[in-house]
């Protein structure tokens, strides 16, 4: 049951990143709209996480045994809160002061918005394009790999994955955002059954946004406001890089089979299957 008088809950997912947790919580505390409560999901903890240095935001820790992936951590955080709006953040994301208030206001103003986000920028101030993208088809993935979207940024045929014809500093609907900053209406999250925990690393945000849109809600992008994303910090924290690469491949394959295979041309499907076989062979047999 949604808590009375409490509107916004924050879920900060951390995997052995105490220094980033401090930055993320302090940025939330310094913002113009502080969440009513923040749950820090400590994934596979090796020592107790100290939140004492980040004052100004009501926060508590939920420990999650084992590394079951970002989606599982997000679900654990959502279950620990009772607010109608949930802000999911990577620990390596520091919001700008007006970002949370602006994104929440835009989402609340339209009952058809199920997910909202802002523009993510990296420490060198370049845009993290994962915050502003379309649901990629096989063709979109190929165009992106061949950098055709860079050669023809105004083309909807070549630039669909990055939605490159749209102004990244404006506000508009998109097909998918990055899970590193995702404001989600609880009603929409409940309607789709939460994050799909079968996605352990990568594509869980694409899957979430796709299913939210299929359920009738919109995904809204507010590009005038930003959050700093230390992109790759979570991956670098994982000791077993083989686990990461295998999980990414499994996510790609699962997303293709669930959402793309049926709409991929019959002549193309054998090539996709060959690509997956080659990638699995490169990874080699699973150890342990």
Image (cartoon, rainbow, N blue to C red):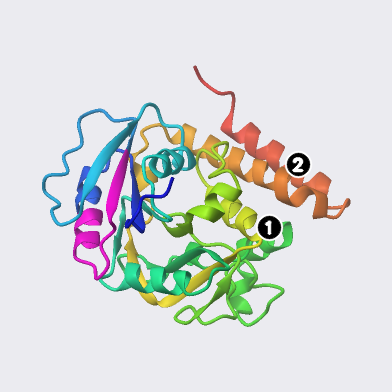
Residue 271 forms part of the magenta stretch? no
* Of residues 94 and 275, the one drawn nearer to the viewer in this rendering: 94
Identify the residue at image location x=71%, y=59%.
Answer: 137
- Residue at the (20%, 37%) spot, across then down: 49
> Which stretch is magenta?
23-41
Most foreground residue, 11 or 286: 11
Placement of 37 over or under 18, stated as above or below: below
Instruction: Characterize the local packing of mark 2: few (<14), some (14-19) or many (20 or more) Cα atoms within 10 angstroms.
Output: few
Q: Is residue 232 visible?
A: yes
Which of pointers 1 and 2 indicates the residue nearer the eye? 1
- State the SS at label 2: helix
Residue ID for mark 2:
274
Residue 273 position, x and y percent, is 76, 41
Residue 29 position, x and y percent, is: 20, 60
Q: Are marks 1 and 2 in contact (CB under 8 Å)?
A: no
Circle 1 sits on which residue? Answer: 214
Position of the N terminus, as image quadrant, is top left
- Can residue 125 be spotted in the picture? no
Q: In which image quadrant can residue 61 be found? A: top left
């Amino acid at each position: 049951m949604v808590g009375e008088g409490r509107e916004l809950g924050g879920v900060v997912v951390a995997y052995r990143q105490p220094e980033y947790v401090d930055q993320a919580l302090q940025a939330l505390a310094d913002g113009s709209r502080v969440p009513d409560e923040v749950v820090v999901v400590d994934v596979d903890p090796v020592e107790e996480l100290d939140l004492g240095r980040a004052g100004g935001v009501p926060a508590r820790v939920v420990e999650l045994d084992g590394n079951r992936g970002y989606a599982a951590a997000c679900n654990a955080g959502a279950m620990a809160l009772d607010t109608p709006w949930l802000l999911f953040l990577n620990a390596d994301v520091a919001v700008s002061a007006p970002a949370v208030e602006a994104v929440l206001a835009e989402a609340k103003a339209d009952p058809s918005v199920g997910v909202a986000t802002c523009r993510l920028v990296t420490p060198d101030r370049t845009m993290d394009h994962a915050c502003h993208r379309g649901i990629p088809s096989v063709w979109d993935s190929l165009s992106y790999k061949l950098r055709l979207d860079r050669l023809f940024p105004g083309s909807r045929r070549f630039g669909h994955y990055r939605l490159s014809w749209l102004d990244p500093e404006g506000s508009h609907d998109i097909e998918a955002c990055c899970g590193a900053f995702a404001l989600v209406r609880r009603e929409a999250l409940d309607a789709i059954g939460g994050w799909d925990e079968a996605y352990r690393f990568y594509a869980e945000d694409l899957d979430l946004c796709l299913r939210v849109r299929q359920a009738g809600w919109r995904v809204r992008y507010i590009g005038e406001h930003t959050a700093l994303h230390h992109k790759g910090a979570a991956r670098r924290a994982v000791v077993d890089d083989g686990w990461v690469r295998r999980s990414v491949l499994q996510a790609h394959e699962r997303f293709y089979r669930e959402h793309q295979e049926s709409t991929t041309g019959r002549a193309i499907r054998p090539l996709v299957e060959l690509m997956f076989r080659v990638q699995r062979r490169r990874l080699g047999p699973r150890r342990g």
